[in-house]
Amino acid sequence: MSLSGKRIYMLRHGQAMHNVDKFWPERDPPLTELGIQQSEAVALPIIPDLVVCSPMKRTIQTMYKVLSKLELNEDPKIEIWPDLREATNAPHNNGSSKADISSAYPLLDFTRCNEEWDYEENTEENVTARAAEVLKELKSRPETNILVVGHRVLFWYIVGGKRFVNCELRNYEFNDTGTMVQIEIL
């Protein structure tokens, strides 16, 4: 089996308020203090050519904390992909409106996002399709070191296997059949 050489680093967000309180009633919860510390402790072994991130506060906060530790000559390209949003229907998995999240993070491009968080309800069928679209887009990208910052359940749909814990970082490559193969847990 040969591998593509394109490295995909998948990082689940740090602990957020809904991870502490399973009945967290508010949408788009931020990281907790522990989540901030977890994010700051992530040791990304590469400087990514591309960062793709879910449009939720907890993933964006995690992304910025991880990137802030790297010695960058220039900022990596960052794209916000709404297809990376979480795959369950709990209230805390509803994000902010485009206006609110753009205001909070004005340097990011939210053009792919809906004006309001009015995405269809998650079902097995549409989450499977969304995960397949994420894989398809990752495969088509020319970049060779891609950091994906997202959520536990959606990552399970993308790569299967054991579910990610908060701020867990795993490294994958595409094999010659186009399947993502785990290289290591970092």
Image: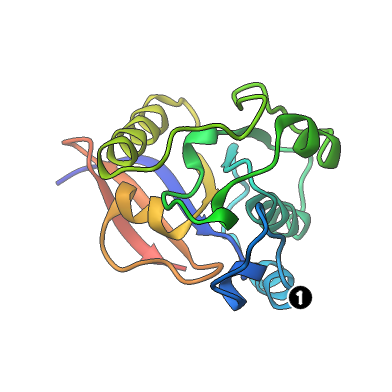
* Residue 121 image point, x, y percent: 42, 39
- What amino acid type is highlighted by mark number 1? Glu
Q: Is residue 128 above or below residue 112?
A: below
Q: Is residue 144 visible?
A: no
* Residue 98 image point, x, y percent: 72, 31
Left or right of residue 67: residue 155: left
Where on the picture, by quarter, is residue 134?
top left
Q: Residue at x 22, y 42 (%)?
A: 179
* Residue 18 image point, x, y percent: 60, 68
* Residue 12 image point, x, y percent: 52, 60
Please tell me whether mark 1 sits on a helix, a strand or a loop.
helix
Q: Residue at x 19, y 37 (%)?
A: 176
**Label 1, residues with CA under 10 Å away: few <14, some 14-19, many ≥20:** few
Q: Is residue 146 above or below residue 11?
A: above
Q: Residue at x 71, y 35 (%)?
A: 97
Q: How is the image coloured?
A: rainbow
- Write down the residue under mark 1: 33
Q: Nearer the viewer, residue 84 or 135?
A: 84
Q: Residue at x 27, y 45 (%)?
A: 124
Left or right of residue 154: residue 50: right
Q: Is residue 8 visible?
A: yes
Where on the picture, by quarter, is residue 164?
bottom left
